[in-house]
Image (tube, rainbow, N blue to C red):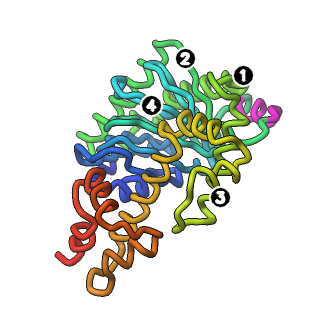
Amino acid sequence: MQAHCYNDFDEFANSIKNVNSKMLLRAPQNRTWKLSSVNLNGINVQTGQLGSGNIAEGELMLDGYMLYLPLTYSVEYSANGNILKNNSLVILEPGCEFCITTKEEHDWYAVFIPSDMLPAGVETEESLRDSGGKRLWVTQPNRQVVKRLQSLVGSIMKTARHYSQFESTSAASCAAAELLKIASLEIGQSLYTEPRPPGRPRLQREEVIRSAKKYLEARHKENVYVEELAIAAQVSERTLRTVFNEYYGVGPVKYLQLRKLNQVHRALNVADPEEQLVSNILMAHGEWEFSRFASRYRRLFGELPSDTLQRKRS
C-alpha cells in the first residue's frame, strides 16, 4: 500500500494514478491532502482526502475504465456538469475528459479497471456502440450496489493498511475478482444507455467548454475577459455564464480569477527567490494591481505571494 500526505494540492493532483489531472483551488485549505492506493493484480484502488473545495480537470488514461465514488455526502459534487446524489456512481471511459467540482473538502474512492481485464461481452458492447467521443456518465445504481462497493473498497484499504503483504496474497486476488465483477456489471449496463443529464444538452455544453478551454490555453498568461471568451465559444455571455455554472460550479468571472490565482501560485512555487521578484512574476501573468491581487491571493491560499516565494529559501 502507498499512502502519502501533501500540503500542496498540485503535488496531490500529480500523484493520483491513472489520470492526467490539474486542480484549481477554489476555497481556503482546511486540512492536509491525503492519498492512498493499493494494486490488486492490476486493478488500482485509491482513496483521496482533499483539503479544500476545488475544480479538478483532466483525462483518464487510455488503457482502462475508472469508477469514482464520492464519500462526503454533505458536500455538493458535480461531474462534467451533472450533480451527484448520495448513491451516484461516476464511470469514466478510457481517455475521457473530466471536470469534478466541489465547494468544500471531501473524500472519495476510485477504482481503475484495465480494459483487457473486462469480460469479452463488455468489450464487444463497447466496440458496437457509436459513442461519438469518450464519455463520462453518472449512474444511479441500486443503493445496495453502492453500499457493497463502499464496504469492499473500505475493507481493502483497511486490510492493506494493517498488513503490508496483503497485495501479494490470495485474499487480494479474491478482492480483485469481486471488484471486477461489480465494475463489469455497472460498465456493461451503462454501455446500453446514453445518459441524459439535466439542464443544457451534454453535447452543446461540452462544445462550449471545449472552445473556451482552447481559447484560454492559447493565452496562458494573458488577461482574458468574459466578453472575448463568449465570442470565442460562439455563444452569448448569458449562455456562457449558465454553462460555466453548470460545468465548473462557478461563473466565468470567478473561474478566470481562480485560474489566474492558481497560475501565479504555481509560478511562485517553482521560482528561485534569489533570482525573481514577486512583482516580476505577477507582471508576467498580466497582473499590475499588486495590492488587490495579494489580498485575493491571501484569502485563497492563506498567505501572501511573497510568503509563497520565500518559503523556498527556508
* Mark 4 vs mark 3: in front: 3
User: Could you tell me which secondary element the residue under label 1 belongs to?
Assistant: loop
Disc nearer the start of the sequence (3/2): 2
Does 21 sit above or below residue 169? below
Q: Identify the residue under disc 4.
A: 77
Label 1, label 3: how far apart the Cα atoms are: 32 Å
The structure residue drawn at horizontal position 64% and vertical position 55%, both measured from the top left corner, is 228
**In which quarter of the view is residue 52 placed?**
top left
Using the image, tell me which numbered label, if any, was put on residue 193. 1
Label 2, label 4: how far apart the Cα atoms are: 17 Å
Which sits in the foreground, 294 or 46?
294
In the rendered image, residue 146, in percent from the top left (x then y), is placed at 46, 20
Q: Is residue 123 magenta?
A: yes
Using the image, tell me which numbered label, if any, was put on residue 141. 2
What is the span of residues highlighted in magenta in the rendered image? 122-130
Q: Principal SS element in the magenta part?
A: helix
Mark 3 Cα-neighbour bin, 10 Å: few <14, some 14–19, many ≥20:
some
Amino acid type assigned to the residue bearing label 1 in the image: Thr
User: Could you tell me which secondary element the residue under label 2 belongs to?
Assistant: loop
Mark 2 near mark 4, Cβ–Cβ under 8 Å?
no
Mark 4 Cα-neighbour bin, 10 Å: few <14, some 14–19, many ≥20:
many
Disc nearer the start of the sequence (4/1): 4
**In which quarter of the view is residue 137 placed?**
top right
Which sits in the foreground, 185 or 133?
133
Label 3, label 2: how far apart the Cα atoms are: 37 Å
**In which quarter of the view is residue 107 placed?**
top left
Label 4, label 1: how far apart the Cα atoms are: 22 Å
Disc nearer the start of the sequence (4/3): 4
In the rendered image, residue 9, in percent from the top left (x then y), is placed at 35, 54
Disc nearer the start of the sequence (2/4): 4
Amino acid type assigned to the residue bearing label 3 in the image: Tyr
Using the image, tell me which numbered label, if any, was put on residue 215. 3
